[in-house]
């Protein structure tokens, strides 16, 4: 077990030895959780007030970092991704205008409410069930402040479950989900962990949170992955047939009859030639322009999204994959903001 995984449980033996009661421990954990949610709430209120004062925005992409990596099945570096993505967005090597002409310096297009303090919460012994609820509540606090729309920076892909659940619950019905990934992430409980990053879309599809799930870029899938897709009615588009499916995928129309469209981008949907800084390197993926064509041409009301699984610990020394993730965030922000 790595250092980052151990940190969340390292105090528990000490507390057990000291015979700290479960009630006392839970009370302390609740105080930390309340303080964490207060931080997100107040930052969202401030940013919402600013955007409303500027006027004219129907939807504003709002960055929310979720630096969680312990549900990774291989490496846990995605916990360090949110600050690297932010740094790359604003590093100055490129201008602040998206390809479709949105100006990211305009707070009505993109704003930021900071990170959910995942490690601080885990250091108090909070389990994953409560942690997932904290992530979901943080998303809802962003959505409370019209016109803010959550654009979540992972973190490993386990975060998509509580985020999609929260978006669906807040909007009052299911959304359509476009999921770009090398893997379907739909194991029932990978390695016994129901919250594994490899099980996030099984959790999503068990509820009534998603009307239609399209998975694009798939090229590492087991018999269970195919069986789970059949069970949940998932539309899977594998890379081995991408040339055949390209026209359809580059002209998607989603969201009719749903509460909107959610886009989840795992950076490893890209071929590692474009994005080497990921935990699970899987050759034969999408080109960066393939992904942008799918995003730019998509017809539908994109209400939220996430970009996950950047692993800065495997990135090149010049941070190439961080720049790739940042570009995905920029273009997704342009798709959400209205």
Image (cartoon, helix red, strand yellow):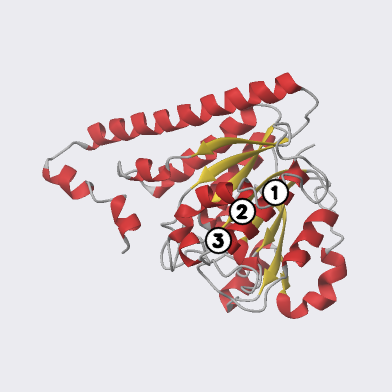
Nearer the N terminus, badge 2 or badge 1? 2
Q: CA distance from mark 2 to mark 3?
A: 16 Å
Residue that mark 3 sits on: 319
At 53% from the left and 71% from the top, the residue drawn is: 280
Question: Residue 200 appears in which quarter of the rendering?
Answer: bottom right
Q: Residues within 10 Å of mark 3 (few under 14, many from 20)?
A: some
Q: Nearer the viewer, mark 2 or mark 3?
A: 3
SS category of the residue bearing label 3: loop
- Label 2, label 1: how far apart the Cα atoms are: 11 Å
Looking at the rendered image, the quarter that the C terminus falls into is top right
Say what secondary structure mark 2 lies in.
strand
Q: How many marks?
A: 3
Specify which label sits upstream in the sequence, 1 or 3.
Answer: 3
Q: Which residue is mark 2?
A: 307
Query: Residue at the location (72% across, 40% down)?
Result: 104
Q: Is residue 196 visible?
A: no
Q: Residue at x 25, y 33 (%)?
A: 23
Label drawn at residue 330: 1
- Left or right of 160? Residue 72 is left
Name the quadrant of the N terminus: bottom left
* Lower position in the chain sequence, tag 2 or tag 3: 2
Judge the density around disc 2: few (<14), some (14-19), many (≥20) Cα neighbours within 10 Å.
Answer: many
């Amino acid at each position: 077990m790595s250092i980052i995984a151990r940190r969340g449980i390292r105090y528990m033996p000490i507390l057990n030895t000291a015979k700290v009661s479960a009630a006392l421990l839970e009370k302390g954990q609740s105080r930390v959780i309340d303080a964490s949610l207060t931080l997100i709430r107040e930052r969202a209120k401030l940013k919402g007030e600013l955007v409303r004062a500027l006027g004219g925005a129907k939807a504003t992409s709002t960055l929310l970092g979720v630096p969680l990596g312990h549900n990774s099945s291989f490496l846990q570096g995605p916990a360090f991704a949110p600050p690297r993505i932010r740094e790359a967005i604003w590093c100055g090597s490129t201008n602040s205008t998206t390809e479709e002409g949105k100006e990211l310096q305009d707070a009505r297009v993109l704003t930021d409410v900071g990170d959910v303090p995942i490690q601080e919460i885990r250091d108090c012994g909070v389990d994953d069930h409560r942690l997932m609820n904290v992530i979901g509540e943080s998303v809802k606090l962003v959505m409370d402040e019209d016109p803010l729309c959550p654009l979540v920076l992972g973190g490993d892909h386990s975060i998509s479950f509580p985020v999609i659940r929260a978006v669906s619950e807040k909007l009052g019905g299911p959304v359509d989900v476009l999921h770009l990934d090398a893997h379907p992430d739909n194991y029932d409980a990978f390695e016994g962990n129901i919250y594994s990053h490899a099980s996030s879309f099984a959790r999503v599809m068990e509820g009534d949170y998603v009307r239609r799930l399209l998975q694009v870029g798939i090229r590492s899938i087991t018999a269970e992955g195919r069986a789970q897709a059949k069970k949940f009615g998932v539309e899977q588009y594998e890379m081995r047939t991408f040339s055949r499916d390209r026209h359809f995928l580059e002209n998607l129309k989603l969201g009719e009859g749903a509460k909107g469209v959610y886009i989840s981008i795992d950076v490893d949907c890209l071929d590692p030639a474009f994005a080497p800084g990921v935990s699970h390197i899987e050759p034969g993926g999408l080109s960066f322009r393939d992904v942008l064509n799918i995003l730019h041409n998509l017809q539908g009301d994109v209400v939220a999204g996430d970009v996950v699984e950047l692993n800065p610990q495997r990135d090149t020394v010049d941070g190439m994959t961080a720049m790739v993730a940042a570009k995905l965030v920029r273009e997704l922000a342009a798709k959400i903001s209205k």
